[in-house]
């Protein structure tokens, strides 16, 4: 067990050097880039680096209202298709209500509404179970959503919102944002290093539902503002509060966008957003522009007109350009929004905090001091207790700390204050492994064995005990990684890495150093 071939020694040396290189940028600040030297440093969490903290709530009332409108349209279409006469079709709290005019058609109307529930509706993805409660008192019908259907939709909306929020934040170029579900309809967002919470709120405060519609020129805007609005049009304002009369019919939806990038107009050199549709969206856009040459069309984002250019010629390439008096930052933010997709419902900000880097600096200093003090005390204890063997263990313990930093830099894990606590705890656990080995060696040596045999037996017999202790700790920390969130997860990550590196340094590095010393010096007594 004490024999290391030349190949093993080379592999161990290369592996240690590699981890040392990965950790180096965290300890040495270089004025210029050095070829082949890694550039990744530790990602610091919100509690260490500072940044923005938001607690968001998905507006479930908007979801319920939107699905109610879908239900109303589906029922209206189904009844008209089957020539069922009705009146007073309207939205109620959890669905819609209506009156069937002809009493002889009540039974037929009920069957038609049931068919909407069983698959004619685009309300929910799962149509295998009934999602509507249909009740009627003579000719008055109330059609409401079941609690299970609403709960399923809310859960889906929160999951979709988390993914879209993640894509929007990633578009800003920040590292390691923490996005967690909290409760039934809330999202906890932490963005380390982002000290502009207003920009973050602006980015998340828009549902980003983009659509392209024709401007209605059949009636003047002034007449529309006086109440003379055509039935299929509506008045929408732009960011300068200028009203536009726009058709309700959507020519192309933003869901058909394949890409959006901030750029500059080649003629005016002003910031613009270039967009590109998918195949189906490109065909719809080409057809719409071909049929409306010479007419203005509106680009509407979240019920606000951002641009209303005139169609000079058919746009057949499936791509176009949005102009809206953008700054470079606002054009980039709009491109991020469009690429990420539309939120299923607005996000309400319940709580916001901006954590300054000063607090993080204090935490880093405190954690560094705690780590240094703990490390020095441990090194002193192990050296005084075991002499030369303690010195070898101290070398391995120092390398263990370097290895942890190197692995964290390699996987770009986020270091939090609890993560620093995990590193400090790991140092203590690494000492424990060495103590078990050295005490076992002492017992074997005191029983009359030669130095070489005592060391060989000490490592062999301590292996199982240390493996049992480390594996159980590793299992617990892995469970915390997969099931825990926030600070708990940060602690578990550093603890898991520390358990593995501690075992490696105790059973490989220390054993290699001790074995080389024994083979070269061949001592008659063990200094332990």
Image: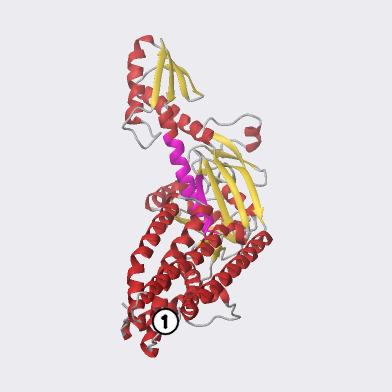
What secondary structure is marked by label 1?
Answer: loop
Q: Is residue 465 left or right of residue 195?
A: left
The residue under the point 47% across, 60% down is 493
Q: Is residue 278 magenta-colored?
A: no
Vertical arrangement, residue 362 with respect to residue 163, above or below: below
Number of numbered labels in the structure image: 1
Horizontal and vertical percent position of residue 111:
32, 20
Horizontal and vertical percent position of residue 279:
37, 53
Q: Which quadrant of the structure image shows residue 517?
A: bottom left
Vertical arrangement, residue 19 with respect to residue 331, above or below: below
The residue under the point 42% across, 25% down is 76
Q: Which residues are magenta?
A: 152-181
The residue under the point 42% across, 68% down is 436
Residue topped by disc 1? 526
Furthest residue toward bottom: 520
Horizontal and vertical percent position of residue 88:
49, 18
Vertical arrangement, residue 38 with respect to residue 99, above or below: below
Along the line of sight, which residue is nearer the eye, 379 or 47? 379
Q: Which quadrant of the structure image shows residue 348?
A: top right
Along the line of sight, which residue is nearer the eye, 497 or 382? 382
């Amino acid at each position: 067990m004490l024999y290391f071939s030349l190949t093993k020694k080379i592999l161990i040396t290369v592996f240690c050097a590699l981890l040392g290189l990965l950790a180096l940028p965290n300890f040495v600040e270089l004025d210029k880039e050095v070829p082949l030297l890694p550039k990744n440093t530790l990602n610091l969490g919100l509690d260490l680096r500072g940044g923005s903290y938001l607690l968001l709530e998905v507006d479930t009332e908007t979801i319920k209202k939107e699905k109610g409108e879908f239900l109303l349209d589906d029922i209206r279409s189904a009844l008209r298709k089957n020539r069922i006469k009705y009146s007073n079709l309207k939205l109620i709290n959890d669905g819609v209500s209506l009156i069937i005019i002809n009493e002889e058609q009540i039974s037929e109307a009920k069957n038609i509404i049931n068919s909407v529930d069983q698959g004619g509706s685009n309300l929910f993805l799962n149509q295998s179970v009934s999602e509507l409660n249909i009740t009627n008192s003579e000719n008055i019908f109330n059609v409401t959503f079941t609690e299970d259907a609403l709960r399923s939709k809310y859960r889906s909306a929160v999951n979709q919102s988390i993914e879209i929020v993640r894509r929007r934040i990633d578009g800003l170029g920040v590292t390691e944002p923490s996005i967690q579900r909290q409760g039934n309809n809330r999202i906890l967002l932490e963005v380390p290093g982002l000290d502009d919470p207003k920009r973050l709120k602006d980015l998340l405060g828009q549902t980003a539902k983009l659509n392209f519609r024709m401007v209605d020129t059949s009636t003047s805007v002034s007449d529309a503002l006086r109440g003379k609005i055509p039935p299929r049009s509506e008045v929408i304002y732009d960011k300068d509060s200028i009203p536009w009369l726009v058709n309700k019919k959507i020519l192309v939806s933003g869901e058909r966008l394949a890409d959006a990038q901030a750029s500059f107009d080649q003629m005016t050199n002003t910031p613009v957003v270039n967009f590109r549709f998918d195949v189906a969206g490109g065909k719809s856009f080409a057809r719409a522009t071909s049929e409306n040459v010479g007419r203005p069309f509106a680009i509407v984002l979240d019920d606000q007109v951002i641009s209303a250019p005139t169609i000079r010629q058919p746009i057949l390439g499936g791509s176009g350009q949005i102009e809206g008096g953008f700054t470079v930052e606002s054009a980039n933010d709009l491109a991020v929004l469009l690429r990420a997709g539309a939120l299923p419902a607005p996000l309400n900000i319940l709580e916001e905090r901006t954590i300054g880097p000063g607090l993080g600096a204090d935490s880093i200093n405190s954690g560094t001091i705690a780590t240094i003090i703990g490390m020095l005390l441990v090194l002193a204890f192990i050296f005084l207790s075991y002499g030369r063997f303690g010195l070898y263990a101290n070398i391995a313990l120092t390398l263990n700390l370097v290895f942890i930093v190197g692995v964290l830099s390699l996987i770009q894990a986020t270091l939090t204050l609890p993560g620093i606590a995990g590193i400090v705890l790991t140092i203590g656990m690494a000492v424990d492994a060495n103590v078990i080995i050295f005490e076992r060696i002492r017992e074997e040596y005191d029983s009359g064995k030669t130095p070489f045999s005592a060391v060989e037996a000490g490592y062999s017999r301590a292996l199982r005990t240390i493996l049992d202790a480390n594996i159980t700790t590793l299992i617990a920390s892995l469970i915390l990684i997969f099931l825990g969130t926030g600070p708990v997860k940060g602690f578990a990550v550093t603890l898991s890495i520390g358990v593995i590196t501690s075992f490696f340094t105790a059973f490989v590095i220390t054993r290699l150093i001790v074995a080389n010393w024994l083979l070269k010096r061949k001592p008659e007594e063990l200094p332990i």
